[in-house]
Image (cartoon, rainbow, N blue to C red):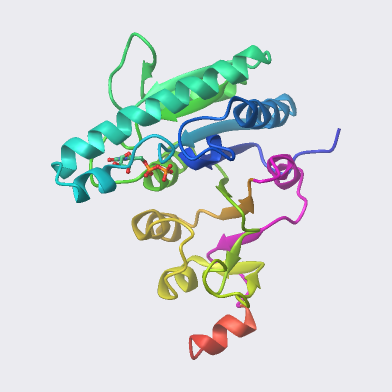
C-alpha cells in the first residue's frame, strides 16, 4: 500500500456527484463507488471529512428565482444536504466504514450537532466525518462550508471534486473548446480571472488562510486515492502556485 501524502483531508462533493447519469436524485451505484474510494482512503489511515452539497435535490437560488423567500429556500437546501449526508453514511457503513454525520442544523434524531472539537475527535479515532447542512446559514453555499470546516478541523487540503473536467482551465471548457488546462494556479489568479473553482466567498476564505485546493475529475473516483498518495492529478490551487505563463499574459503580469 502506497504511503499517503496527507494526514487529514476534506473532500467536497457536490450533490451532482451523487447523481451519476440521472437528471435528479441519487444513483446508488455511483454512491457505492464513491463510498468505496472514501473507505479505501480512510483505510490507509488518512483522516477524511466530507462536505456534501444538494444540487441533485434542491438549490435555494433556483427556488428564490421562482419567487420563494431566499432564506427559506436556502434552509431547505441545507436540509437537502442532510439527506445526501445520510445516503453517504449508509453507503459507507454498508461497506464496513465507521462514520459520523455532524449537522450544522439540529436534527438530533439522525445526526450529531456540529461541534468542532467532537469532529476532530472522531477523525482522530479514524471515523469518516460527514458535515451536513452546510454552514447552517442562508446565503452561503456548501463550497463555503467546505472551506470553513476544512480550516476549523485543520485539514491540510480541500479535495474539490468536479464533473467532466480534469481540473481548472483558463476558460469554461464547455463554452470555449480550446480552453487551456492549468495544472497550477494561485487563489488570487483564480479570483481575478473569475475561474469557477468554487464560489468567491469560499475561494477568498481559502486564499486568506493559505488553504490549498486540489481540483480533480470525479468521473474517476480513484482520483481521490491518487491525490492522497501524492500522484499528480488535476489542478493545484495554492497561494504560491507557479504562475502559468498563458494565464500571466492574460492578466498583464
Ligand atoms: N445552503 C445554504 N447555506 C450553506 C450551504 C448550503 O443556504 O451554508 C443551501 C443553498 O440554498 C444551496 C443549497 O443549500 O443552494 C445546496 O448547496 P449547494 O448549492 O452548495 O450544493 P452543491 O452545488 O454543492 O450540490
Residue at 21% across, 51% down: 65
Residue 121 position, x and y percent, is: 50, 21
Image quadrant occupied by the N terminus: top right
Residue at 47% across, 68% down: 195
> Over which residues does the magenta segment extend?
219-243
The answer to whether residue 139 is visible is yes
Single out the residue that lies furthest toward the top.
Answer: 109
Specify whether residue 234 is painted magenta.
Answer: yes
Residue at 38% across, 25% down: 82
Residue 200 position, x and y percent, is: 36, 60
Specify whether residue 155 is painted magenta.
Answer: no
Single out the residue that lies furthest toward the right.
Answer: 1
Residue 39 position, x and y percent, is: 68, 25
The answer to whether residue 118 is visible is no
> Which of 35/173 is in front?
173
Q: Is residue 167 left or right of residue 134?
A: right
Callout count = 0
Q: Is residue 214 above or below residue 71?
A: below
Q: Is residue 63 left or right of residue 85?
A: left
Q: Is residue 215 above or below residue 44?
A: below
Q: Is residue 236 above or below residue 40?
A: below
Q: Which quarter of the frame holds ligand 1?
A: top left
Q: Is residue 247 above or below residue 72?
A: below
The picture quadrant where one finds residue 98 is top right
Residue 126 position, x and y percent, is: 62, 21
> Which of 167/104 is in front?
167
Amino acid at each position: 500500500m502506497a504511503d499517503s501524502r496527507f494526514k487529514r483531508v476534506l473532500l467536497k462533493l457536490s450533490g451532482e456527484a451523487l447523481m451519476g447519469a440521472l437528471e435528479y436524485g441519487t444513483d446508488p451505484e455511483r454512491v457505492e463507488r464513491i463510498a468505496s474510494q472514501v473507505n479505501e482512503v480512510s483505510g490507509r489511515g488518512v483522516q477524511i471529512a466530507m462536505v456534501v452539497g444538494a444540487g441533485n435535490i434542491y438549490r435555494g437560488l433556483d427556488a428564490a428565482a421562482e419567487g420563494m423567500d431566499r432564506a427559506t429556500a436556502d434552509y431547505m437546501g441545507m436540509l437537502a444536504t442532510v439527506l445526501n449526508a445520510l445516503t453517504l453514511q449508509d453507503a459507507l457503513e454498508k461497506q464496513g466504514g465507521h462514520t459520523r454525520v455532524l449537522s450544522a442544523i439540529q436534527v438530533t434524531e439522525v445526526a450529531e450537532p456540529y461541534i468542532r472539537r467532537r469532529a476532530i475527535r472522531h477523525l482522530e479515532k479514524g471515523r469518516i466525518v460527514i458535515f451536513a447542512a452546510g454552514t447552517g446559514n442562508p446565503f452561503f453555499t456548501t463550497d463555503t462550508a467546505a472551506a470553513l470546516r476544512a480550516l476549523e478541523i485543520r485539514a491540510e487540503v480541500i479535495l474539490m471534486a468536479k464533473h467532466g473536467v480534469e481540473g481548472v482551465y483558463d476558460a469554461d471548457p464547455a463554452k470555449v473548446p480550446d480552453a487551456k488546462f492549468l495544472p497550477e494556479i494561485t487563489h488570487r489568479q483564480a479570483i481575478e480571472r473569475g475561474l469557477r473553482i468554487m464560489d468567491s466567498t469560499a475561494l477568498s476564505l481559502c486564499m486568506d488562510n493559505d488553504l490549498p485546493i486540489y481540483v480533480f475529475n470525479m468521473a474517476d473516483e480513484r482520483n481521490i486515492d491518487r491525490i492522497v498518495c501524492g500522484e499528480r492529478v488535476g489542478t493545484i490551487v495554492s497561494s504560491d502556485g507557479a504562475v502559468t505563463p498563458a494565464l500571466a499574459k492574460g492578466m498583464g503580469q
